[in-house]
Amino acid sequence: MPFNFVQSKIAELSPIVGLDEASLKILICTLLSFPFGVIFKRLPDQSYTLKNLYNLAVSSLYVFGILNLRSGLVTLLISATGTYFITRYLRTSSMPWVNFIFLMAHLCYSHLHTQFFVTFDQTKIDITGAQMVLVIKLSSFGWSVYDGRQPKDLLTSYTASRAIKKHPNILPYIGYVFFYASVLTGPAFDYADYDKFIHSTLFDDVPDSKRPGRNKRRIPRSGRQALYKTLQGFFWAFWLFQVPRYVNLEYVLSGKFYANHNFIYRIIYLWILGFTHRLKYYTIWLIAEGACILCGIGYNGYDAETDTFKWDRVQNIDPWAFETGQNVHTCLEAWNMNTNKWLKNFVYLRIARPGKKPGFKSTLFTFVTSAFWHGTRPGYYLTFVLGAVSQSLGKIYRRNLRPIFLEADGKTPKPTKIYYDIVSLIVTQLLFGFISQPFVILDFKLSLYCWATAYFYVPVVAIVTFFLFRGPYAKVVVKWCRSHSASAQVPKEALDNIKLTSKEAEKVKSHLDSILEREFDTLGLPPIDVLETVDKKEFDEDVKDLAEAWRSFRGRRGSIKDDDFEGLKDAYNNFTNEINEIFTSKKEEFSKKPATMSKANKVD
């Protein structure tokens, strides 16, 4: 049998390459997607059926000829078939939730089955990875079908762009589910993108002068951009093969690691080991993105001003942003980006009632969804819980220490700000080296042992930090920090030109901080302070702060009587204008780094 010949050759090649058979099979399929992508781009633009059949033919070759995934294919088909019938025939408002629960329950079963009833075999691929990608695609598909049945005025610009007006037939649906370039490792994308891709309407904005070939193919050339992403993947692959020779998890758990090295050496070792864990994701995600760019689905528009194409539609990782991130939030925004989009748009925002902003319930539900989506092993939850704590630590230090390194305007950095940035970078990377280990170890006792080799230094720092900034001496500590900030040194006469006093502005800033920071936390990983209160206390305090600021603002502007409508209106307009200015400033502050990352993503 030809397929048996392929399997035997892969088994022979595995020790030569240095990859286990399962990883090698995935890599082979990913690399084969490049020549298959070249062929796909040359299929007739209007041959929709042919394109879908081609996708299925290539995926079948992968599944049966290379991956040997017959049993795993059944798992994927159960999810795909269930979603198709639920979304097509269940016409109630609960349809997307029924679909979501079905998919998550099936995924949870797969996680538990793998955890308790399957012995690890390096020759077999764990289908739960592909099923996780499929859960993202199919749950978003369910919401898109639901949105297609809603009035336009109830949809946001994002949901309207993803809405499915007519439920697809089985062929394009299966073509979407088993799209060859992303069937195993992702990236995940919405059906609306796939539909535009197959019908070539995704490329409507491509100028005629940019269309390649005699017949002016609609998909523009993307070989150079695809090669750039692929070379990035091979760059990280090189380190993937080199670094484990010197740093590995087995040594950490052997006992010699703790016995033979001091504390500083051990935490640096864990940092490098954490970097090693990320390398396989950098490698496969970047190469897979390159394959998607080559076939065209990575296309994200034409910029007439710069006369360039954007190819970041399915970008899933930004290694540079992660490795240079100065806080947990920034790093997570650069990691598994398509999962972040799914959690935000199809979990976090969907929990909130129509017309209401997401609150604690949305945050908690997203956290639970993300945790169960990743798996059921204890190591995942150790990483998630400590990650949530770490985000809160970052906020505490940013709020209290960062202003010390800024000028009085709160924006201009002092010359010493470079030291704050360097320390933030080092601390963030050391932190990930510690909290990410259980995510790979998975076992509860071994994870705790790994942390013990570094004296649980991150939890210890967390306890000390919460004691200082949330404990009995919190006011003294915060006051000391503020006394060393430049804004506290501003002469009194300079404040006369400020419409809001520093105390009033501080209340408004604090309120806006809490709003902006609660908007959405990447990977469903909320700061632990979001989980501290479950009732309306936090909201009441926010409102109280603004009310106190308003009363103070109004009282200092003369005696304005309640029946003095014009006076009240002028005072209120001035007050809201001040809040808007502060809000704009804080919004820019919060969006500065993500915007920078997004800009960097488009330079290709």
Image (cartoon, rainbow, N blue to C red):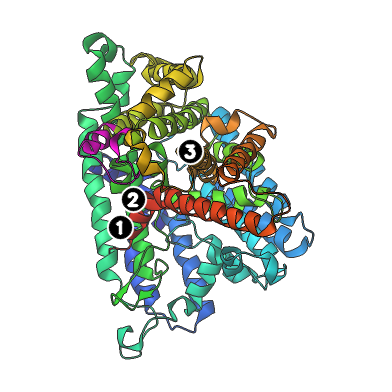
Q: Which residue is mark 2?
A: 318
Give the labeled residue for mark 3: 506
Q: How many residues crowd mark 1 within 10 Å: few (<14), some (14–19), many (20+)?
A: few
- Which of disc 1 and disc 2 is earlier in sequence? 2
Q: Nearer the viewer, residue 207 or 153?
A: 153
- Tell which tag, 2 or 1, sits nearer the viewer: 1
Badge 2 amino acid = Asp
Q: Which residues are magenta?
A: 404-423
Q: Say if mark 1 contacts mark 3, CB within 8 Å.
A: no
**Compared to 186, does 35 lie above or below?**
below
Location of mark 1 (residue): 600
- Please, what secondary structure does the residue beneath circle 2 have? loop
Of the residues tagged 1 and 3, which is closer to the observer? Answer: 3
Q: Nearer the viewer, residue 424 or 435?
A: 424
Q: Position of residue 175 (x, y in %)?
A: 54, 66
Task: Please identify the quarter of the rendering in which residue 308 is found.
Answer: bottom left
Measured in 3D between alpha carbons, the distance from the residue under mark 2 to the one under mark 1, in whole angstroms, is: 9 Å
Which residue is found at the position 25% from the left and 46% from the top? 236
Is residue 420 found inside the magenta-colored segment of the image?
A: yes
